[in-house]
Every structure is written in C-alpha cells, then in structure tokens.
Amino acid sequence: MTVSILGTRVLRTEDPGFLTTGGVYTDDVKLPGALHVHFVRSTVAHARIRSVDVTAALRAPGVVAAFTGADLAGLAPVAPPMPSMNPHMVQPLLARDVVRFVGEPVAVVVTEDRYQGEDAAELVDADYDPLPAVVDMVDAAAGSGRLFPDAGTNVAASFGDADALSAGLFDGCEVVVSRTIVNQRIAPAPMETRAAAAVWGEDGRLTAWIPNQGAQGTRAALAAMLGVEQDLVRVITPDVGGAFGAKFGADPEHAVVCWVARQLGRPARWAETRNENLIAMTHGRAQRQTVTIGGSRDGTVQAYRLEILQDAGAYPKFGAFLPMLTIMMAPGPYAIGRAEAVAKSVVTNTTPVGAYRGAGRPEATAAVERAIDLFAAEAGLDPAEVRRKNLLPRFTEPHRTAFGAVYDSGDYAAALEKALAAAGYQDLREEQAKRRAAGDVVQLGIGLSCYVEITGPGAEEGGPNENATVEVHPDGSATILTGTSPHGQGHATVWATLASDELGIPVDKITVKWGDTDLIPRGGGTGGSRSLQLGGAAVQQASRELLDVARQRAASELEASAADLVFDAGRGAFTVAGDPDIAVPLTRLAARERLFVRAVFRAPGPTFPFGAHVAVVEVDTETGKVMLRRMVTVDDAGTVINPLLAEGQRHGGIAQGAAQAFLEEVVYDADGNPLTATFADYPFLSATEVPSFELADMATPTSYNPLGAKGIGEAGTIGSTPAVQNAVIDAVAHLGVRHIDMPASPQRVWQALRSAAAGD
C-alpha cells in the first residue's frame, strides 16, 4: 500500500523544461520553406473602403504575394457565435467594403523573410471614405451611426425585458441608492501574442499550429471559416504563453494564414507584434452598469436591480454574450428577497470584446459589491456588518437562485469571518480612525468583497463533461491523453498525480499529452475554470476503470475470482487476498495485451466556488496615488489536489484583478483611435506594485465530482477587483467621496477629492 499524494505540494513537472531548454511555442515550430504573413490593418475606425492597392508592395524585396478582401470573397464571413445575436453583424476574414475598427485587417503581404514584411506592408495603399465613428456604447445604444445598416440597429443581443422591470421593486425600502458604474475595457495582454503556422499535405489535409485553449474548438472554428470539413483539419497546440480566455477558438487571422498556405502551396506562418495584439486581439470586460439597491436602515437588503450595457466592439463575439453570465451571477452570495437584471450588448467602432479571465462573473461581483458598499454608506453602517446580515446561510444541498443558477454548496459567512480575522479587521478600522482624526495626508482604506462564481459550465449534450485516456506500458510508464489544454496551470503535474495515486506509477514516469486533434479528436479545452473538476475527474475515472480491466485479466491469469484480488499500488501489482506472495504486475498485463481505457466523466452541473477578499490600500490625498499594502483572501474551491498550484492560480488572479482596479484601461479617442497601443501607454502590474498576498485556506467540497474539487483559476480575478476598488473609495470616503470608477488612477482619485471638496 502507498500513502496518497493528493493534497500534497507535488512540484511542477513542467518547470525543469521551461527553465532549461525552454518551451516550444508556435513561433518556434520548425517549418522549412515557410512564408511569412503580415497583416495590413485599418488606420481608421469606421470607413468605406474605396480601394486597397497592393501594387507597390508586390515590387518590394522578398514579397511573394499580396491579397485583399476581394481575393478571399469566396470564403463566408464569420457569423456571431450565438444564435440569439443579430445575424447581420458578420465579419469578413479581410475587410472588403467597410472597416469597423482600427486594427481590422484589410490585406496581407507574404514574404520570404520575416523582416521584409513590415516595410512591404507599409507600401499597401488603402483609400478610405471616412464614416462617423461610434465609440461610446451609450451612443451606440441610442442608435447613433449604425455600424451595420442592414441590421437596422446597433444592438447585437438583449437579455431580459427592460420594459418588464418592476415599478414597485423598491417599495417599502427605507434606504435606496442608485449609481451608474463602469467596468472598464481591458486588454488580456498574454506574454505570447497570437500566432499561427500552417501547411497543407498532399492528401488535402491542413495541419495548423496555433496557441489556443482547446485544439478541438480551434479546429471547428478554422474549418468553418475555411469552408472545409473538420476531418480535413488537424490542429496542434504547442506550448502556450498565456491566454486568459482570449485564445479560445480561432480568429480570422488564423484562417487567413491557412488560406495563404493553401493558395501558394507552401507553408505559411504569422506571429503578432505587441502593437497588433493590443489593438486587434479581443479585449475584456467593457460594461456600463447601473446598480440600484434598497433595504432597511438596519442593513437588511430587500431589493437589487442590475442594468447592463455591454460594449461588444465592432463585431459580436463571445463578449456580446458576457451579460448573460453577469445576470446569472447578479445577486452573488446574498439572500436578496427581490432582484432583477436586464442587459443589452451593442456594437461600437472598437476592437471586439471576448472572454477575459472570469468572463462575465467578475462583472457581476464588481456590481453587487459596489452596491453593497454604497448601501452601507447611505445607511451609515459598517460594510462588513451589512455583508454579515445578508449573506446566504450555510448550505450543503443545491440552492437555486432567482436567476437560474444552482449553487452546489457554500458557507459564505464562514469565508467572510475567516478573511476578516486573518486581516485583523477591527485593528485596521482603529488605525484608519486614528489617521482620519490626525488629518494624515496618507489615508488608509479597507475594502471588502464576497463572491460566488460559476465554474465548469458546459452546453455539451448530457451536461458538462470531459474525456481522458490512460494507458500503462510494459516498461512501467504510463501515458495520459486529455481533452483539456494547459497554458500555465500545471495540468501535466496534477493529471500525473491523479493517475499515480490510483496506479502506483511514479509521477515522473507518466507523460501527459494534449492539444492534437488527430490524437485527441474530442475535448472541451481549458476555460471557465473547468479543467480539474471535469478533466481531472476523467483522469481519475479512467485510471480506476483501467484497474477494473486489469483486474479481470489478472484473475484469468491467476485462475482466481476477481473479487479476491487486491491491487497493491506500492508494488503496482494485483495480489490474492491473504496470499501477497502471488502477484501479477500491471507491466506484465500490459506486455501481453495493450492496457488502456478511455473514460468520459460527466458532471451533474457546474460548481460554484466562493470566497471573501480584504484589500488594504494607502491613498495620498495630495496626489491621488494609491498603494496596495495588503491583500487577504479566502478562495474556497473545494478539495485542493495540489496546494502549490492552487496558490499560484490565486496569486496570479489576485494580481490581475487588482491591476484592473487601479491601473489597467484600454482608451480610445472620440474618433476611435486607440490611445493605449503599446506597453508605454497600457500599464499593468509587476511584482513591485503588489505586496505578498496573504492566503487563508478553506475547503467546502462539492458532491458534483469524486474529487470534491471546484474551479480556482478565475477566483482571484473575481474577488480582488471590487475589494481594491472599495478600499480606494473607503480611504477617502470621510472626505466626501462616494464613488470612483476603475481604474482608480492618481488622476481619478485626485479629481474625486477636488470635486468632493468643492461640494460637487
């Protein structure tokens, strides 16, 4: 027998390779004779295309070919991803008649050498007839300057009926407060930008290397854009340098690279520049929210309304669907008697919006947590007390909300109390009171947030599911095939740990493979914090089913009853109960006949992790500068298989969420020109801007999978953002400031202080 290694800090098996030889990313894939594709992108936000002349570019050194939208006219445009979205809002692979955002590709130049393309692309002469740019989502909702005249509207999708909102929702409330807040547009900015490499075989099949979050979904998207059957497309996922939701599926640029390879009969490749990435890769968030909250003066919240306006960008992608998830999670972890939410997604002349770490759920938490703080301030109550009074009580049986979410298990009050205790909340309030009384220039702010999120959702037939194949080899090693797709999470370590725990094979002798559609044709990929609770559970299930198969073979060999056999993981062998000297090792069974099992794990539904965050900031009231001093968090994701990896996920998420609260923002001018197109203009957090986070542990297992695990990948991003924003506002609330939109930059904080001092 062996001791289980689940729940221990098994070191990442991925790291030695990354730290020595390095990863193999799409741009590292060896593809002899490959041509280099360079995109010519629109420099105006909205215009009719008069002409795109590639003549001069074709004469440039090293140029093999150049193509415009007219050359790709035979390919169907990309339709919105959801049937509920406006079907007229389609995107051509290369713009042909109209450009709708700065950065939209209008042509490609193909060169022999990578560095010949930038100069040649500048020789492409695109002539535009400018149209009015619609940059503000409020203007778009009002019908200003329609992006798609045939659509008859700028509304891409609606969720709920705004006309059906209850006129008496807040009847009987002693305190009612309303505020319109902004959950700003941000850039995913992964370390590795987008890329593609493609070659067509003599058999007519395409092989494409693309950094993605799920090769199977990328294959489906590529095949649809190219107009070919999926069986003719093989997608291989090399190492992926970050994704954060923005590398799901495939983008038009990926399909164009594949089309160029087919058209010219040579391999083709593309690697995005950082400038391209910031203006053309999908952005995240971008919601305008109106929150209204009401209740009694004792702090009981009786009613809550959330009205959402979503900026979908120039073409409706997954971002246009985000409000649906925001609505689902609108009430958060609170027991609110009356609640309602509606949303509208509109197109604007800006970069399309897609999924970004949390995808709709951080927006819901940001809204309700600001609302709770606004209510507490209006009622003159401590925000911690208001939360205590309104959190749902502990439950172990599924709880259905008014918005259709079925929370699997939760103890939200315990998470809050644990976070407050770890932070020393009362001591912080006392220190704050002293600074306020002394009139210190640098004031202390304490911000709270409580959250619950949905992880592992799935629209698959039969509910959320994932597959895994486990095979034991005669040499004592094993191979795992998984439908998930890691890009930094540590799947190779955890999946090997799960199989090792069942089979007794050392972790370092287990190889995990993913991201090759010929090898693994089906899979849901990685997103929505689904991997462990679905993919990990599938690995465990496959390992156990493999033992069942092996047990029958061993029973036949020993001429014994299978029920009398005991598997000794320490020896990696079956023995007869009561006679341990007689043993049949797995390796011998694998040598006689291939020993493998493919399993599909199906969950009854998604899980709902939860937690509470406490942020402590210092704000210089003379300059508006914010310093994040402490972050104390409880992130309950059920059973933790590897604390080291779980903590890494929490640290990364907390940093990203905090960065949104006081630093990151994609900005456009009135004409739709991006003003944050380089890292000089688009700042994000480094280690010097954040403290060491203080992580308190709590685990409420779910019954929805045998591991008891919920998702952890997005939790930090969901809880930290409103906690930091609330902390900044709390630091200057005694000076009359009631709200500061994110990011709480020094300029915004300073302006809020000046306005409050002037009585505005």
Image (tube, rainbow, N blue to C red):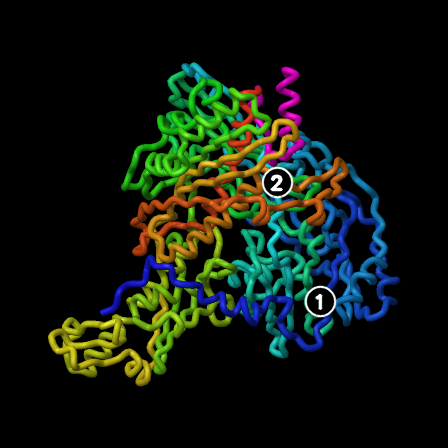
Residue at image x 27%, y 71%?
547
Q: Position of residue 661 (x, y in %)?
A: 56, 38
Give the residue type at disc 2.
Leu
Of residue 247 and residue 402, the one placed in the foreground of this image is 247
Classify residue 464 as left or right of residue 620: left
Examine the rendering and report whether any part of residue 67 can be seen: yes
- Distance between mark 1 and mark 2 Cα atoms: 39 Å
Q: Which of the two labelled residues, at mark 1 and mark 2, occupies the earlier sequence position?
A: 1
Q: Secondary structure at mark 2?
A: loop
Bounds of the magenta segment = 736-760
Q: Secondary structure at mark 1?
A: helix
Label ID, residue 663: 2
Residue assigned mark 1: 260
Residue at image x 73%, y 58%?
73
Q: Residues within 10 Å of mark 1 (few under 14, many from 20)?
A: many
Residue at image x 53%, y 58%?
213
